[in-house]
Every structure is written in C-alpha cells, then in structure tokens.
Image: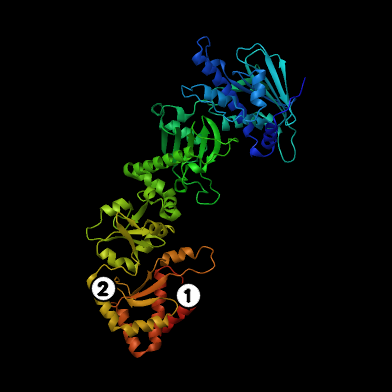
Amino acid sequence: MQTKQFQAETKRLLEIVINSIYTNKDIFLRELISNASDAIDKVYYKALTDNSIVFNQDDYYIKVNADKEKRQLIVTDTGIGMTAEELEEQIGTIAKSGSLSFKSENELKDGYDIIGQFGVGFYSAFMVSDEVTIISKAFGSDQAHRWQSQGADGYTIEPCEKEETGTQIILTIKESTEDDDYDQYLEEYKLRSLIKKYSDFIRYPIKMDITRSQKKEGTKDEYEEVVEEQTINSMVPIWKKNKNELKYEDYQEFYFEKHFGFDKPLRHMHITTEGTVSYKAVLFVPEKAPYDFYTKEYEKGLELYSNGVLIMDKCPDLLPDYFSFVKGVVDSEDLSLNISREVLQQDRQLKVIAKSIKSKIQKELLDTLEHEREAYETFYKAFGRQLKYGLYSDFGTHRDDLQDLILFHSSKENKLVSLAEYAEGMPEDQKAIYYATGDSIDRIEKMPQTEMVKEKGYEILYFTDDVDEFAIKMLREYKEKEFKSVSSSDLDLDTEASEESEETEKENKDLFTQMKEVLAGQIKEVRASKRLKHHPVCLVNEGDISIEMEKVLNTMPQEEEVKADKVLEVNTHHEVFTSLQQAFQNDQEKFKLYTEILYQQARLIEGLSVDDPVDLTNKMCQLMK
C-alpha cells in the first residue's frame, strides 16, 4: 500500500491548522458534524432531481461514539459518502471543498444550504488526533474505501468493507499533557456539551450511546448501568419556527435555556428578514442589568449561527455599544466566513445585518415607550445610563438613534418624561429646554438657580447621572430648541430684572470689584444676580465646563485638575446684601469675612467641598461674637 503525499500547499495548511489557525480545539467536532450534515443534504438534493431516489428523513442521522479503551472518537453519517477519487481530491487537496463545488452545480431549494464551503474544517481533527481514518462508501457504489493519515507526512487510500452508504471518521485521540486535556474528548459529558453548544440546530438527529444508572429489576436498592441511544440535538431552532405558533412562555424558556439572564425578558423580537441579506433572529431586552454590565469585564454580543451552526458565542459587531444589553441569536446563510469559521470577516453582509438589527431594537424600544410605559421605565432604570453613554460617545453621531429614547425627571410632572413630551408641553414664548444638575432630585429641588425658571412657569429637567450633562452637550438641541442649564451665566429670562441688576452693578461696582479681589483665583467674576429671588448667593458658570462637569472630571485620573469658570452671583434684594454694603463702607475686615463666608456657602449649595472647614467654622464663630 503506497503512502501518498499531500500537495505542498495542503501540507503547509495542515501544519498551520494543527498549530495555529484554530484557537479553540473544541470546534473540531463542530466541523466534522457540519461535514456530515452536508453529506446527508447531498442525498436530499439528488432525490429532488432523481425520481428513483426516495429520501426518507428518518433514515438519515449522525452518530458520535467514544471508545475509551482504544482512545477513539467515531463520527458516523448516513450521507452520500465518497469514492476513492473524491477522497483524494477533496481531502488530499487544499481547500478543495466538495460542498462548495456541489453548491455551485446545484440550485438549492426548500431552505436547505450546504454549510461547509472551504474544505479545511476537516483538518481541525488533527488538532486532537494522532491518526485520522475515514471509511466511506459512496452513494450508488459497491466498493468502500479507507483513507488514513497521521498528519502532514501523507495519507493512504485502500479498498475496504462497509455495508451501508455513508462515512465513518475515526479519530485516535492524543494522550493528555500538562497543558492539554485530550482525555475530555472521550467523555460523554464533554461530547454532549459540545454538540449542544455548536451543533444543537443541525437539522438531522445527532445520536450518542448514553450510559445511565437504573434500578435492577426485582431489587430494592441495587443499580446497574445501561446504555441507550439518545438524540442529543434539538434540530429545529426557535427562530426557524413560525412565530404565530409560539407563545411568550416558549421565548421565556429559550431565554432561560440559553442562560441569557436570571431575570425574565422584558421584551422579545422574532425577526425574519429576506432581501439582499437574509437572516433570522430572536432578540431579548432583559428586565435587569447583569451584575457586571457597567464594568470592563462585561462582553456584549449576540450568538451568531450560519445555517444552524454556531460560529461565535458573542459577536460584538452585531450590536452598537449603546444597545449592548440586548441578548439573543442571529442566523444567516449569507454571511461570508473565513477559513477557521471562528472569526467573521468585516464584510458587507455583516454590516447590513447589524444595521437592520439596530433599527429593529430602536423601533421596539420606541414602541414599548409609547404603549407600555411602565415596562419601559423598568427597562430605563436598568439601562438608561447606557443609552446616555451612547449619546455622548463618538461625538454625538448616534443622536438620531437615541434622543427619543432618553428620559429625565421633570420638575412639573414629578416623574420621568421624554424630550418629546417636554417639547410638547413648552409654552410658545419658551426659547430653550432648561435643565439642572445635582446629586439627587431633592438637592436639585432646593437649588437657588431654579427660582427664576420655575417662576416663569417653565419645566426643568433634572440631571442626576454623571453622564447626563455630557450627553446633552453632544445633543446640543432638540427640535431646534437649545439646552440651557439653570446655572448658566447667560440665563436671560427677565429683561426688566436684567436692566435692574445692571444698574445695581454699576452703583456697586467698587464693592463687587473688592469681593473679586478677596476671592482672587477662586472665581472669575462677582456680579448682581438676575435670577435669585429668596437666596442670598449662588455660583454659576461660564464656558463649556459646568460646575457639575468639573466634579465628574476631577474624579478621573488626569495630570491637571479641571476647573470651571465660576461666577459668584449676589442677590442685591436680600438683607444680607445690605449688611455687605454697610461692611464695605465701614469695616473692611468684616466685609472680607462676609465675602469669604458667602463664597463658601455658595460652594456648599453646589455640593462642592469647603476649602478649609476649620477656617470656615472659625470665621463663623468670629461673626457670632
């Protein structure tokens, strides 16, 4: 018997496959089962064009068995089989895929497709095997053949005996080492888990002989082990079933089976899309955020299948970051896969599917917001922050996708409202959308800066998340209305009050100049307030960096401290200002004391730390003497 050599490029590929192409050895079984499924499909296609062939689906299956004593793993199928010529041509030649050539020569019908298209998946068997044997009998042939190889050194082909049409692949599993556990590929539990994980939705039964314990007949407490053949895979995935035949409980059960979460899915989407790129999907919006959702450890992504075969556990490219909470599966026959079947090429098909999925998630969330408000607010409590991060990221390029999905607490409604709801309730004379930032709703309610806006009857959105103001800065405007902070220095709401404050400022120019000098380096300006009604003093900001943004940015590691341009506003109608004027005229030490205490008071109102608490308390005691 002559040993034949692989073609030079095939030999080189085989060495690469064994050592580096596949990063996960587990996928070898997926590849062999996919090839077996293809072999059965080919019989089905022959039956479509040859009336003498009867395709009885019950006669076709794939079987996986392990023989621990011989260290052999055996994968058998009842498919079309291979002749000696086909064994040499398809196995001995690099990427000479029988499946690909069959697909190009036959028009595929009835939703069937040939999975293997690259002819290299078979070689992954050598990652776990010292020797691979193929015993195959082709459809319509009387002679079977044995192909055998121990790797890159070559292979042999010889006639042999085999009664039934089909192919049997025998892997002689390697001995385990300190670094690699090959023994696991001879264990029932491991083989079952690999079949369920990667090949659960192959359309033909995948069978195994399963050992189980049962009570001996006629005994009370004696048990014996019995072996019975079981079908391991589910075959028909939920996304290929008619959605009209499925109930909510079916989707919920699938959610639990796939371990997408310990909660119940809040919403599900069953998608079937035909067109330039066709795909099916079942997607879920969880009710609660996973414990690690807002950490670097969290991995987004949907399970990706090609015609029922798992390609990736989590394909991140199918979801934008702001929809990373979505769980589910996507199955497409149109995706181009690279030779390892592990990494998707960044091709047009994938991008088209991702764009379609993004639109469907957005539409689903908008529908929930409109028709199931309570459910949406439950979702928003868990994932609203992620939507706002999406607004902020990439310089606001996702604003059109997200601006109608975000909610904020309303000063008028005392509940969450959308930007659309805010805009709908705006008086005709209102020129901007007003917001206030703070650690909590209660703290914002007490902010002096809100007085003027509330007096005008305008609604205020309360920003309590760190990301809120950053997101709104990227959004810039909504329905041609700009966003304006109640703490903005240019909050001009009352022309009459503005004119009065300007006049007062002129009259007390020296006083405000002196206050600025006392607080040199801490503030940019001191001025008469146009907004304060009852409070004596407050801080506002000029420029792009607000006081709240300063707080957030300074919690992050950076070389220099970030500082907002702060302006101290004084309520000239408050009795404190009268005391301030008198001190300015009669007692400079007391004036300085008043100024420093008022500034520290304004910092406390803003939730900023006091520069020197001991010094402040000493000054307060001095004032009380």
Q: Is residue 203 left or right of residue 180?
A: left
Residue at point 32% right, 41% down? 371
Mark 1 crowdedness (10 Å alpha carbons): few <14, some 14-19, many ≥20 = few
Query: What x and y, as percent, mark residue 13?
Result: 67, 35
Give above or below for 231 relative to 388.
above
Q: Is residue 293 left or right of residue 206?
A: left
**Disc 2/disc 1 C-alpha distance (Å):** 32 Å
Foreground label between 2 and 1: 2
Q: Nearer the viewer, residue 562 or 187?
A: 562
Residue at point 28% right, 68% down? 492
- Label 2 sits on what residue type? Ser
Can the viewer see residue 394 in this picture?
A: yes
Can the viewer see residue 231 in this picture?
A: no
Give above or below for 539 relative to 442.
below
- Furthest toward the front, the residue is 8
Query: What x and y, as percent, mark residue 574?
Result: 29, 77
Name which of mark 2 and mark 1 comes first in the sequence.
2
The residue tagged 2 is 498
The number of numbered badges drawn on the structure is 2
Query: What x and y, as percent, mark residue 476?
Result: 36, 58
Residue 495: name its quadrant. bottom left
Which type of secondary structure does the marked residue at label 1 adopt?
Answer: loop
Residue at point 55% right, 20% down? 42
Quadrant location of the N terminus in the rendered image: top right
Which type of secondary structure does the marked residue at label 2 adopt?
Answer: helix
